[in-house]
Image: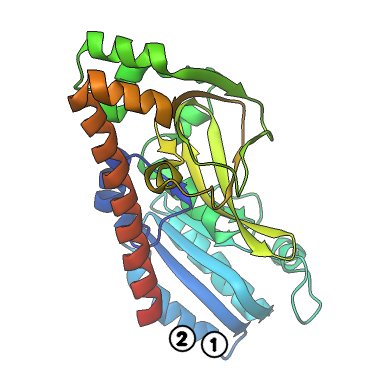
Amino acid sequence: FYVNQMSSRWHRPESETRILAQKGDQAVIFELQGSLFFGTTQQLYINLEPELKHRNFIILDMKRVQSVDVTAAHLLCQLRDSLAERKALLILSNVRENLPNGRNLREFLEQTGVTDGSDAIRLFPELDSAIEWVEDHLLGEHDRATTSMPEQPLELAEMEMFQERKDETLADLEAKLIRRHYAAGETIYSRGEAGDAIYLIRSGTVHIYAHLGGGRTRHIATFGRGDFFGGLAFLDGQPRGNDAIAATDAEFFILTQEQFARISEEHKKLALTVLRSLARSLALRLRHADAENAMRQEY
């Protein structure tokens, strides 16, 4: 897989999605499984070799790896050094502390010199966080994210869906919106609540969690500055199907259905813009999910 075929859980604005579609083949993902030992490393290298000269990021996901021996560790060192020669990166995800054979994989990779502090290798706790990190690099956001400059809340005119609207129209809309701040870790809404509003993110990050049963939840999506969420329940009038939690301190514009009804009477074109943006965003997310599921089934 390439990163333009398997994205992270971060739902990016359409402008960023287009960039990742163009640049995503700079990063390739291999999902490893079974035992990595002297009998399998040669085949692994054969599979990886065509990518070594062309990709800036090679992600090896080790979630399904059962064991790793010294021969495989030596191969990882070779891959790391080969990529380092042209300033490319080897990325390992799901490097666990407890393999089925009882070995601490993270400790073993340190002992064998694979993770020796080299800038040419990075470890991530899960595949999604590795892909998200690569996406940020492809979008040129990494340097901005590591600066000390605080994130400034966006105004309506700076948000993608409103950039072509007249100032006076946006002023009328903004007067009807609710401004709200949520602290990191605070619940924005919970499953079962009325879905009577959409949330426009001025700053910060939001995580969406699905319920799996037995009190368990799973992180399924991340939304950031300039994006919006809560659109599905807003459109179909059904209760919320998941939980939204502020991952960081966050600022929002909140548009309720009541206020949207008033806007629809006063600014029909603006109301149509909002509906089109909601529908387009949901369609793009569904289309991408369908394509990703089809590709996983193929492999």
Q: Is residue 285 above or below residue 111?
A: above
The image quarter containing residue 62 is bottom right
Q: What's the amino acid at mark 1?
A: Thr
Residue 273 makes an appearance in the image = yes
Task: Give the number of the disc on residue 79.
Answer: none
Q: Most extreme residue toward the bottom, as rendered?
A: 39
Q: In the image, what residue occupies the spot 43% across and 45% down?
A: 237
Name the spot of residue 218 as percent of width and height, x first: 62, 58
Q: Quadrant of the C terminus?
A: bottom left
Name the spot of residue 35 as percent of width and height, x first: 63, 84
Is there a contact, CB below 8 Å, between mark 1 and mark 2?
yes
Q: Is residue 192 above or below residue 106?
A: above
Residue of label 1: 40
Scheme of image coloration: rainbow
Task: Give the number of the disc on residue 43.
Answer: 2
Numbered label tally:
2
Q: What's the amino acid at mark 2?
A: Gln
Which element type, helix, strand or loop, lies under badge 1?
Answer: loop
Q: In the image, what residue occupies the spot 51% across and 61% down?
A: 80
Q: Is residue 286 above or below residue 265?
A: below
Q: In the image, what residue occupies the spot 24% across and 39% down?
A: 276
Name the spot of residue 248 as percent of width and height, x first: 61, 31
The foreground one among 45 and 244 is: 244
The image quarter containing residue 61 is bottom right
- Between marks 1 and 2, how big is the CA–CA gap? 6 Å
Which element type, helix, strand or loop, lies under badge 2?
Answer: helix
Name the spot of residue 247 as percent of width and height, x first: 62, 37
Residue 49 makes an appearance in the image = no
The foreground one among 95 and 242 is: 242
The foreground one among 175 and 285 is: 175
Q: Quadrant of the N terminus?
A: bottom left
Q: Residues within 10 Å of mark 2 (few under 14, many from 20)?
A: few
